[in-house]
Image (cartoon, grey):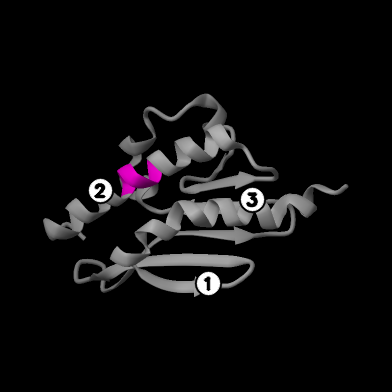
Amino acid sequence: MSPQADFPLVFEQLKSILKPHEKNLALTADSSTAYSLDGPYSEKYKQVIFFGSAQIKKNYVSFYLMPVYMFPDLLKNISPELRKHMQGKSCFNFKKVEPELFKELAELTQQSIEKFRAAVNKGEM
């Protein structure tokens, strides 16, 4: 069985990490292969701020979390195992369901939403 066969399940689990934050962010994509959330419009950057997404790609399922790019200190305590899944500064790629890493990613997402919201409220974004 090819690894791609697991991608829909991986995607649904990664989407479930973002979904609870939908009420405080703007839903911009919700399909069988992409789920995406944006933050508010930023006067500082003159555009809507992307928050995060889950997307099925050709060789893996990607989880994007922009606050870890904006606030790199969020990454200082992540496990080496989760860090191995990073590609670039704000993307994590998975080929299979990894419950412990998804739990850690959910905690990182919660920390990210708190830091993101605080920056928005202070007018830093």
Asked whether, in this view, residue 68 is left or right of residue 55, the answer is left
The x and y percentages for residue 112 are 33, 47
Label 3 sits on a secondary structure element that is helix
Q: Is residue 6 magenta?
A: no
Residue 14 appears left or right of 125: right
Q: Earlier in the sequence, mark 3 or mark 2?
A: 3
Q: What secondary structure is found at the residue carrying circle 1?
A: strand
Q: CA distance from mark 3 to mark 1?
A: 15 Å
Cα–Cα span, label 3 and label 2: 25 Å
Q: Quadrant of residue 124?
A: bottom left
Q: Position of residue 7 (x, y in %)?
A: 70, 54
Task: Tell me the residue at 41%/72% (across/down).
Answer: 27
Say the numbered circle drawn on residue 10: 3
- Magenta range: 108-112
Estimate how packed mark 1 is, as few (under 14), some (14 to 19) or many (20 or more) residues with alpha carbons within 10 Å.
Answer: some
Question: In the displayed structure, would residue 84 be above or below residue 12?
Answer: above
